[in-house]
Structures are given as C-alpha cells and as structure tokens.
Amino acid sequence: MVELDELLFRWQQGENLSQLSRSLGQSRQTVRAYLKRAQHLGFTKDADDSRRAEVVRSMLRKAPAAPSPARDDLEPWTEQIKQWLNEPDMTVKQIWRLLGRKGLKVSYQSVNRFVRDYVAPVLPRNTVRLETPPGRQAQVDFGKVRVRIGDGLVWLWAFVMTLSYSRHRFVRFVARQDLPSWLECHTRAFEFFGGVPETVLLDNLKAGVVRPDLYDPTINRAYAELERHYGFVADPAKVRTPEHKGKVERSMPVVRQQLAAGREYDSLADLNDAALTWCLEEVGTVPNGTTQEAPVTRFERDERTCLKALPTAAFANPTWSECKVHPDHHIVFERSYYSVPTRYVGKTVWVRATFRLVEIHFQEELIKTHVRAARKGTWQTDQNDYPPPAKAFLFFHPAHCRAKAVELGPDVSAMMEAILADNALRNLRKGQALLRLGEKYGAARLNEACRHLLAFDSIELKRLQQVLERGVPAPAAEPAVSTELSQQTLAFLHPAESFVAGGAR
C-alpha cells in the first residue's frame, strides 16, 4: 500500500516512467501497468490525497471470484450441506461422497472451496495474551525425552516448571511419570525457586487431576495434600488446549534441543546436575523473546520476594489409593494386607500411605493406622478387628485343640496328637478342622473313623472325611489255607538239611 501510494504521488509530481522505475525498483512495464489501472479507476494528476488513498485501496482489493460451473451446481445444495455440517463426525470429504451418491459430479476441491467460502467460512483465529504479575503463576509440564546415558539411549520424563512472569525454569528428569515423581518434582522446584507461587497451571495427567472438568475438576488427593501443605492453588488447564500454558509448552522443545540433543551423561544424577546448571547459567541468562530480559535477572529483581515462603515442615509425600475391604477384614494395598474393623467389610475406603505408616479413611474419618509393610505379601493384622466368634476360632491354640479332642474321645485325641506332633503351629488349622468334623458327625463316628485311619498310620484329613461320609469299610475275610499237599507237590520238596552250606544238593 505504501509503495502504490508513493508511486501515484510521484506521478502526480511529474516524474516519468524511467524516473519512477529507478526510484521504486520496479520495471517500466510494472509501473505502466499500475498507472494504467489507477487511471482506469478514475485517478488523475490533480486528485487530492483522500482520492489517492481510495484508489490505492481499490487496487489492492481482492478481485471477486469468477463464476464457475461447480459453484452453480452446488448452490442448490447449500441448505442440505448446512444440515450435514450440523451432524456429529461430519467432514467435507463425507459431504463430497454424499453428493456423489446423489448424482452430483464435482471435484472434492470444488466442494471444499464452496463450503469454506459460502457455507461455513473460516474466521480468522484470535487470541488474548495474558501476562501475570510476579509470583502469581507457575506452569508445569511432563514431556518424554530420549537422552544418551552411558553407552545407550534411554527414554526419560522431563518435568519443567516455568514461572510465568520471569520465565525462570526448573527442570528435572525422572524415570517414571508416576505420582511420587510428580510430588517430588514439585517439592524440588519450590526449593529451587526459594518460594511458592500463588497458582500452578498444570495438565490433566492422573497424578494431578483424577477427573478433568472445566469448572469442577477432581484433584488427586495426594496432590491436593501437597497443595494445602505449600499453600498454592492447583489450576488444571482446559483439556487438549496446550496454548493455555504456552510458556511451559515452549520450554519443552528447548529442553530437548539444548539438554538432550547431541549430549552424553554418565548417569541420571549427572543429567539433573547439568539441568540445574543450564537453568541458572545458560538458558536463564539469555534474554527472553517476549520480556527482552534474562529470566534469572527478572526473577531476582522482581519475583523472588513475591513468592510465598516455604513451609518449615517437610512434606510427607503420601500415596493415596482407593481400596475395598474384603470379607477377611483386610484391604490390599501395594500387594500387602491391612486389617480394618468388621463394620467396614464390603465398603470402599481411602488409604493414605507415607514412608512409615498406612492410614485408612472412611468418609473423611480415620478408622485404622498400621505400620507400613516392609515387603510385599506381608499381613498387618490387628486381632481386635475381628468379631468375637471369629476371634474365638482364631485364638484356638494347640493346647486348646488337644483338650477338645480328649473330650471327643481317645481315638480323636490320638489323631490330634499325630497331627500336631510334626509342627503344631503350622498344622493348627488342620487340627481345628478335625474338631469341626466332630461337631458335624458326632464323637462316636469320628472316633471310629480316626481309629480306622490310625491303623494305617494315616492322618490325611481328606481321607478321614471320606470315611465319615461313606462309613468305615468292613474288614475283608481271610482266605482259607489248605495244609494238605498232593503227592506230586511232595515230590518236589527237599529236607531242611539240604539247604545247609555244604549239605546234600
């Protein structure tokens, strides 16, 4: 626009084609074409400035599209195309296919151009830049990075926290994108900055947000505890809207380019040491493209004093998990078992675990606390959690089992002694099962069955139950032995002395 205005102004001042061509750096043909078009629009040498500006705008205005046969064919379908566009999952390509099935033969490019220009024109995208005051906001992100450590390439997760005002960064690499790493990285970031921002803008990853929602998101309970401990407000970004936290999003490719690409490290600890140095001495000293100041300088001058003070107590870094109480009065947390009182059997509880303790909550009430199991598969059981009948059965000890067996009869007592002889504690459950058989079948039948099995040195409980169900088998009759030998048999007999060494053969 400026060049066209200058061209027409100089032409009004009396410059010829050669002079205009040299001064504007355009060919004589181009200058002549512009002057011819301006004169066609009614521009003259005595026209005023407003008229000249109007002609320049007219010359730059886009010429209307020439009518095309495809547009004429598509115009009768305008309303139908609008209806299709309102349907879910509809695309322009699908509209082109539907029109083809109805007998309209036009190209996909024609349909796409018609929809874009006449049916649903694409409006230019606009945004609003939000600048925050010092100490108001930090933005966090987790990104996957491939780094050379030692002799091989490994995939790691890079945690980045960027202060929105100063653009000062904290970067830490971790092996897993899990809840403990997420909480630890926040703690280290606050210690690195020496304070806490008012809000933290985060993604909707599970470690931070359990249920994403634009208005009422559900924050992970462990992250909410971190939020209360440090006094910041967690502010989840809108789902699939990375531009809402553009300051940290821009940091992630910079981390990949400057900390990972072409660099080698001895270990993960070496990489994290290099990341801290990079934040303070390298990228932190380069002027930011928006603020035109180095992030570290801007942070130290304006933002450090605006951050909230760090709490005096260390964060416990808990793990929260939702568990169901099983009929055996135990929950399963990280493959270990923890008991709760009987009234909570079948209910869902929340478990808060720290390094030393496991706390079990029901409807925000603490109902049980256990020492955390040191290894998987451990049972942490408080016998007082069981109801009285269960405790009476559970507290059956070997002496009690022996006494009850004596009451049932001598054969039952002998069977009990045989069961508990090897390892009383290990076989206690088997002895308890023997007593329950007495309650079911009676003392007389149990004594008879025990006497029968003991005659064969058997204490197998399954065999005992079979005998009780089927009854003790009757003893088999002994076969008759004939003492008379035939003459033919006697002929083959030898006298006893024939078997003596050195005797007759």
Image (cartoon, grey):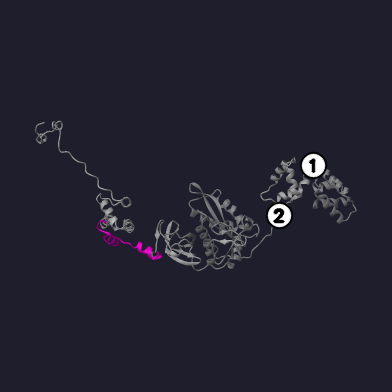
Image vertical order of residue 388 relative to residue 19, above or below: below
Question: Disc 2 to disc 1, how far (Cα)?
Answer: 31 Å
The residue labelled by disc 2 is: 125
Q: Nearer the viewer, residue 150 or 206?
A: 206
Image vertical order of residue 347 relative to residue 44, above or below: below
Asked if residue 287 can be seen in this view, the reply is no
Dominant SS of magenta comes to helix
Q: Which of disc 1 and disc 2 is earlier in sequence?
A: 1
Residue 30 x, y percent position in the rendering: 82, 44
Q: Is residue 425 left or right of residue 496?
A: right
Asked if residue 20 can be seen in this view, the reply is yes
Q: Is residue 483 left or right of residue 86?
A: left
**Is 426 a magenta residue?**
no
The residue labelled by disc 1 is: 69
Q: Nearer the viewer, residue 153 or 235?
A: 235
Q: Which mark is residue 347?
A: none
Residue 413 x, y percent position in the rendering: 26, 58
Q: Nearer the viewer, residue 441 or 378?
A: 441
Q: Is residue 483 left or right of residue 147?
A: left
Residue 84 x, y percent position in the rendering: 71, 49
The region drawn magenta spans 384-411
* Residue depth check, mark 2 versus mark 1: number of the one nearer the observer: 1
What residue lies at 34% left-to-right and 63% top-to-bottom? 395
What residue lies at 11% left-to-right and 35% top-to-bottom? 499
